[in-house]
Structure formats: structure tokens, C-alpha cells
Amino acid sequence: MEKSDVLVENFVKGTMEKWGLGYDVLKEINPKLIYAKISGYGNEGLDEYTKKTSFDIIIQAQSGILDALGLQEGPPKLPIADYTAGHVCAIGISQALYYRERTGKGQFIDISMLDLMFAINIRAQAKEFIPLASKLEMGTKYLPIYNQYHCKDGLIAMTTLTRPQWDRLAVNVLKKPELLKDPRFENVIKRFEQVDVLDEIIEDWSKNLTRDEAIKQLESVRIPCGKTLSMTEVYGHPNLKERGMLCDQFDFSKWGVEKATIPNRLIKFSETEGSVEAPGPEFGEHNEEIYCNLLGYNKEKLKELKKKKVI
């Protein structure tokens, strides 16, 4: 595959078009071109939105994600929309590459961050299927025993959504077999209506144990669980270390940082291991490679584009 066979555009509708480099122009030169575009509201849609400049916080707000996460004030905690868009775009390019291998045809890929955030906002969708969800403020608290619980030294997360899990929890962990005969809890639908009662029962058990003690009991009968780790603690997660996810070989001293850890390769392939080659490009770092090596401009033209603030 030639480097010029895949092009990814980001942000505002018309950015590449105004330079004469839109998909309709480029596909005439290279019909095999795969052209992926990420934007806030999509390439097609209402002009009042598709022409807007957008960022992660705007899309999280517009999609109902901030409300679903209970963030009634302040900024989002993580750039979910940005991160998701990049990964879904990569998947789309992979699918388009497969299609091209079979047909010889390239295509345009339209990624809307708003579409993506709407798709993962299952809290909003659940309100149509589970009326109780609209009455509860916490994002997924309408699910029975799907929560964080206090221990002596912090929080653990756990869930028992299936009947066998509930049975093992009641009998083997809580030591309360009578719960299985309680009509309030006889099936998952009934347990939906007893979220707060069940959470109180769990906390009465967990608050007397350390996190390690609670997890040992839960895991002994295959109840899904784990410690709620702080942003600092997560760097000590043994499985992240074992899988080589903690990448700290790059020099960030120019940013005034003595040491920084970034995620290593996210997808593990059996035949093409791959590696993280750089910590991320500087602004404009690859302009010469793209404009001169790929698009054929000379260095004088590149300087002219910079001087005119085209790039």
C-alpha cells in the first residue's frame, strides 16, 4: 500500500476542499484512495452543524454524555469523544482497505463525533426500555448490584447480573441463603426495583473488610470484581505491566517533565507486533514529509504556504 493511498482529515467541513484537495478531486487522480474524515457533526447533515468547529467538550455536551455521567457543572474528566473517534476511524479504514482488496475501489469515510457519542450513550437509550432508569440520577444505578462499594481501605467495583452469580453471592459470600427465597429478589426484574436495598446489604458486608479480603471472597466463587484504583494507582496494575502497556522510554524533558508514561500499542497482533516509535508529533513536525514527499511541493512552496498562514 502506498502512503498516499489513505488520507485522514480532521475538524471543520471544507478544510481540505478549500485547498482543492477534497475527496471528489482526489478520487479522480487516485480512484483507490481511502479518505477518512473526522468532524464534530459529520460531513453530511444540516449545514448549521456540519460547518461548525467543534471539540470534545462540545460533543460530550451535545450528545447527552455529560448529563448521563452526572456532570452538571465543570468540564468532562476525559476526552471520550476525541479518543473514540480516532479508534472508530481506524476501524473504518481497516474495513475500507479490506473492501478495496476485494474490489479495487477506494471510498470516503464520514466519522461524526456526535454520532459516536450518541451511540454509546446507553443511559439515554435505556430510558426507553427501562422506565426506572429515568428516575435515578446515577448513570447505571438502575442495574442491581452493579456499583462501587466501600471497604476499610477504599472502594471495590462488583456486579452480579446473572442468576448463578446472584446465587453464589447470597450463599457463599454474604452467607444469607434466605435472600434466594425473598420474593423481592426472586428474579433480575424484581432486583431492578430493589437497587438501594441490595446496595445496603452489600455495603454491610464489604465495609468490614479490606479490598483484598473482599476481592478474595468474591473471586473464590467467580463474582466479577476489582479494586477502584486512583489515577496514580493504575500505573502499578500488574497486568498492564505484564502486557507492556506502560511506555516510558521517551524523553519529555523539554516539557519540564522528568518522567512520563504513555500507553503502549493498544492492539496486540500475533504476526505484526508493532511498536510505539514516538511520543507524538510536534505541531507541524511532518509538514515537509507530507507536502514535499507525498504531495510534490518543493521547499520554497512550503515556506510560502507557511508565510501566508495556509498551514
Image (cartoon, rainbow, N blue to C red):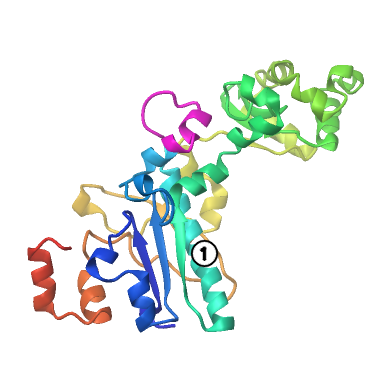
- Residue at the image point whose x is 92% and y is 20% from the top: 181
Residue 107 seen = yes
Q: Quadrant of residue 99?
A: bottom right
The image position of residue 258, as x and y in percent, is 26, 48
Amino acid on which the number 1 mark rests in the picture = Gly
Q: Quadrant of the N terminus?
A: bottom left
The image position of residue 288, as x and y in percent, is 20, 73
- 309 with respect to 55 (left or right): left
Residue 213 seen = no
The image position of residue 207, as x and y in percent, is 65, 18
- Residue at the image point whose x is 39% and y is 24% from the top: 73
The image position of residue 26, as x and y in percent, is 34, 76
Categorize mark 1 by other alpha carbons within 10 Å: few (<14), some (14-19), many (20+). some
Pointer 1 residue? 92
Q: Residue furthest right?
A: 181
- Residue at the image point whose x is 47% and y is 77% from the top: 106
- Residue at the image point whose x is 60% and y is 33% from the top: 123
Is residue 15 shown in magenta?
Answer: no
Q: Which residues are magenta?
A: 61-76
Is residue 68 shown in magenta?
Answer: yes
- 62 with respect to 141 (left or right): left
Decide which of 47, 205 is in the foreground and name it. 47
Above-or-below relation of 269 to 60: below
Above-or-below relation of 245 to 74: below
Which is the main secondary structure of the residues drawn in magenta?
Answer: loop
At mark 1, the secondary structure is: helix
